[in-house]
Image (cartoon, helix red, strand yellow):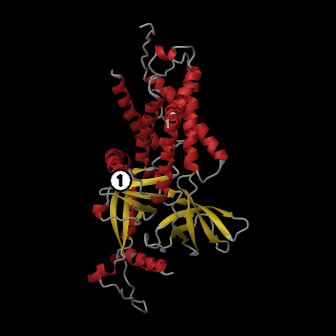
Amino acid sequence: MRNIFLFIRRHFNLLLFLSLQIFSVYLIVTYNEYHHAVFSNTANNLTGGINSKYADIQQYFYLKKTNDSLLKANEFLYNKLKADFSLPDSLPRTYIDSIKIDSLTKYRKYSYMGAKVVSNSVTNQSNYIVIDIGKKNGIKEGMGVINPNNSIVGIVTEVTERYAVVMSLLHKDSHISGKLLKGGETGILTWNGVDPNYISISNISKSAKVVKGDTIISSGFSTAFPKGMYIGFVEALYKESGSNFYKIKFRSATNFNDLQYVYVIESADQQGVKEALDKIKKQP
Amino acid sequence: MNKLLKNILRFFAMIFVQVFVLDKILLHQMITPYIYFVFILWLPFKINRGLLMIVSFFLGATLDSFRHNPGFHAAACVLIAYIRPFVINLMIPQEGSETNYDEPSIKSFGGVIPYFIYAGFLMILHNAWLFLLEAWQFADPYYFFLKTILSTLISLLLLLIIEMIFYRKQKFRTNTV
C-alpha cells in the first residue's frame, strides 16, 4: 500500500498529465457521437451571451451584403406573386388552383422562422453555427436551416433555452441527401474537412449527364428540407475507378464566410414520418 | 501589478483575441493563426507543475466552449504544459536564470534565438497534436505536415509582433536575498 502512495507521489505530474489527456479525448469522442456533452448546455448559455454581443457589433460591417441578399430574396418572392400573371384569353383550358385560400393553414407543410447568426466558423473540421432562437421559440433537433436565398446551411443538432447549435454543411459528419436539378439523380453530400464552401456529392451513377455549372438541390427525402432548396453548383467531376459512380465536387450555394441571417424550417410531417420509421425499427 | 491579477487578465485577453479576432481569419483555407497558448508560455517559472497543467486545461477548455468542440484545445494545451518544464531546463542558458527572472521572455532566455526555439517547439507540439486529434479520420500526411508547419510559422510571427508591441518589463532579481 505504501509503495502505491509513493509511486503516485513520485509520478504525480505524469499521472495528472495522462488523466487530463484521457479526459480531453473522452470529451472529444463522446461529443462527436452524441452531441450532448455534459458541459455544452451551460457553456452554450454562457458563451452564447458573449457571442451575441459580438455579433451585434459585427453585423454592421455586413449590412450592405445582408441588404443585397434580402433584395434578391424579395425579387424571387415578387416574381412568384399571383397578381403578376394573367391568363391569356386564347388559352384552351383554364387551370383552377386547387388550394383553398381560406384554409391554407391546413395544407401548410413547412413554416419558416427567421434567426440571427450568433457565432459561426469555417476553419475547423467540425463547424457549428449558433443561432439566437431556441427551445422557447419552438426549435427542435433535426430541423433544417437555410439562408435568405433558399440555400441549405445545415441541421439543428442541439437546442438550449435561448440558443440553438446548427451542424453546418461544412462538418465531417454532416450527410444530407442532394439531387441533380437536371437529371434527378440523388446522392449523399460529404465534406472533406479542407476547403470551406467546397463540398462533394457521391453515389451519382456514371450514366447521369453532368456538366460543370449544373445545380444541385435538396432531394426532399428528409423531412428537414423541402424539395428544391439550393445546395450548390458543380465544379469538377471525378470518375471513381472500380465503381459505377461519379464523385462530384461542387461549390456550395451558401457562402459560409458571411452568414448573418438564417431561416429555420419547421416541417409538419416530421413527427409523422419519425413515428412511421420508429414502427419499422421495432418490428423484428 | 499583482502577478496573479496580471495572469488572470492575460488569460481573458488571450481568449478574446483568439476567439473574436484570429478565429475570423482564414489564410488560404488552411492556416488558423493561434496565439492564445502564449499565455502558457508566459506563465512564471516557479509555478507548480500540477497547477500549470490544470490552468492550461482550463485555458483550452474555455476556447473549446466557444467553438462547440470540447476537448481538442484542452488536450493540446495540457500536452505543452507538461512538456514546458523540460524545454525550459534545456534552453535556459546558465544555472540560476530562472531564479533571476519571473517568467520566460527574450531577456530571461538570454537572446532571441533560444526564446524562439522554446516557443516554436511548443507551438509545433500544440499544433501537431491539435490537428492530429481533429484529423482523426483523414489520413493525409502531406496536408497535415504543411498545415502544422505553416500555422506554427504564423504563430511565431504573431508572437514576434506581440513581443515588440507589448514590451514586458523583466526585473532582474538577485538570488542573494
From the viewer's side, name the closer residue of A29 and A13: A13
Q: Does residue A154 lie above or below B2 as drawn?
A: below
From the viewer's side, name the closer residue of A127 and B130: B130
Q: Does dot 1 land on a helix, a strand or a loop?
A: helix
Q: Residue at x 62, y 63 (%)?
A: A248
| Image quadrant in which you'd find residue B114 | top right
Can residue B107 be seen? no
Number of numbered labels in the structure image: 1
Numbered disc 1: what chain? A
From the viewer's side, name the closer residue of A14 and A243: A14
From the viewer's side, name the closer residue of B20 and B81: B81
Horizontal and vertical percent position of residue A113: 33, 64
Horizontal and vertical percent position of residue B13: 38, 33
Q: Residues within 10 Å of mark 1 (few under 14, many from 20)?
A: some
Horizontal and vertical percent position of residue B120: 57, 30
Q: Amino acid at mark 1?
A: Asn
Which residue does the numbered mark 1 point to in the structure image? A41
Q: Residue at x 57, y 16 (%)?
A: B93
Q: Does residue B5 lie above or below B60 as drawn?
A: above
